[in-house]
Amino acid sequence: MAVAGTHHAGAFTISVRQVPRDGVGHVYLAGDAAHCPSPVGGRGMNLGIADAADFAARVAEGRLEGCSAARHATGDAVLRLSERGRRALMAPHPAAAATRRAVLRLLVGVPPLGRAALRRFAGG
């Protein structure tokens, strides 16, 4: 499907950030309170759900040690991946745009490759 034109476009600011530690003492942060990735890849909500699920499992087992470090490492990996994707999608240089189009054609044209890329980027 070819895109004939854009009807509306706007600029917005993305504040990609993460707290230094996800937990201190009896206080643990999860979701957007702990990390805000780029919306590219759609990982923000899933990351928050994973934070909550991991925290709940650790509370149920009585083992909160390591929770902050584990969730922080996961958040950091998601932030890095989403930022790489955002930079690749937003790069204005003509060579970058041509490369982006070629890669997207390849991913659409070779379904197993496209599925593998989607799983990698979406965190599956």
Image (spheres, helix red, strand yellow):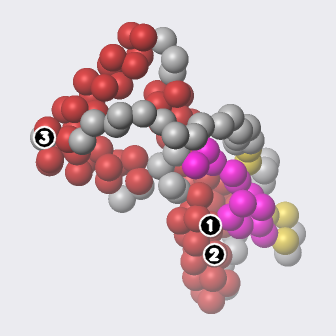
Is residue 32 rendered magenta in the image? Answer: yes
| Amino acid on which disc 3 is placed | Val
- The percent position of residue 99, horizontal first and vertical second, equals 32, 19
Q: Nearer the viewer, residue 36 or 101?
A: 101
Q: What amino acid type should be assigned to the residue bearing mark 1?
A: Gly
Classify residue 54 by image quadrant.
bottom right
SS label for mark 1: helix
Residue 70 visible in this rendered orientation of the protein: no
Total marks drawn? 3
CB atoms at circles 3 and 2 under 8 Å apart?
no
Quarter of the image where the C terminus is located: bottom left
Secondary structure of the residue carrying tag 2 is helix
Q: Earlier in the sequence, mark 3 or mark 2?
A: 2
From the viewer's side, name the closer residue of 5 and 68. 5
Q: Measure the C-alpha gap from mark 3 to mark 1.
A: 32 Å
Q: Is residue 54 above or below residue 32?
A: below
Q: Position of residue 31 (x, y in %)?
A: 68, 64
Q: Which residue is mark 2?
A: 52
Q: Which residue is mark 3?
A: 110
| Label 3: which secondary element | loop
Q: Residue at x 19, y 32 (%)?
A: 106
Viewer-nearest of discs 1 and 2: 1
The foreground one among 33 and 14 is: 14
Q: Earlier in the sequence, mark 3 or mark 1?
A: 1
The stretch in magenta equals 28-39
* Residue at the image point whose x is 77% and y is 61% from the top: 33
Can you tell which of label 3 and label 1 is closer to the viewer?
3
**Given the image, on which type of amino acid does mark 2 rest?**
Ala
Query: Label 3, label 2: how many angstroms apart (C-alpha)?
Result: 36 Å
Label 3 crowd bin: few (<14), some (14–19), many (20+), radius 10 Å = few
